[in-house]
Amino acid sequence: MAHDIAALAEELTAMAAADHQASIHANSDDPAEQLAWRRLTARHADRLSEIMDEYGWPTAALVGEEAARAAWLIAQHADRQLDVQRRALHLLQQAVSTGSARPRELAFLRDRTLVNEGRKQLYGTQIAGVKDGAPVPWPCEEPERLDELRAEVGIEPFDEYVAKFSLT
């Protein structure tokens, strides 16, 4: 079993590395590059689904911090497989409620899933695009409480967060 877990951790970490390398093609002007990105994220989401079937959410206690973060990234990028994303969200919620995962990652995955469902996000983590050099977030449920909600889960204030995306 320990060998299986070590192999699983290594696999998740390798998947995240491949994701990072390929993510530059997510919004490429070249359809072939976009397709390669979509295929990669679909393969990863399929594999994450198998992992969740066997182990539940791969927590840091199970696979280590780096591999747990890798699982979160894979779920985050499973945009075209909402069933996988929703299941990951549910399992991650359970892990957070037992102290086995971070609320910050749950907040990002919750926002991503809400946006993919065509709903308003809660924490303002998902950026729709850039207009006049400034990031434009997807609509938020309670924009007046954004920084308060973000602080509750350990996310920096919205203005600091979007400064990372600014082109000005």
Image: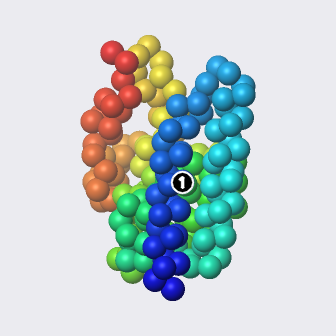
Q: Which residue is mark 1?
A: 15
Which part of the image, by quadrant, shows the C terminus? top left
Residue extending farthest front:
3
Q: Residue at x 67, y 31 (%)?
A: 34
Q: Amino acid at mark 1?
A: Met
Q: Is residue 116 above or below residue 139?
A: below
Instruction: Give the x, y percent position of residue 10.
Output: 47, 64
Instruction: Give the x, y percent position of residue 51.
Output: 60, 71
Q: Residue at x 48, y 48 (%)?
A: 17
Instruction: Give the x, y percent position of residue 39.
Output: 70, 44
Q: Residues within 10 Å of mark 1 (few under 14, many from 20)?
A: many
Q: Residue at x 45, y 73 (%)?
A: 6
Q: Residue at x 42, y 49 (%)?
A: 123
Residue extending farthest bottom:
1
Q: Is residue 166 above or below residue 36?
A: above
Quick check: 56 left or right of 39?
left
Quick check: 5 left or right of 31?
left
Q: Is residue 93 visible?
A: no
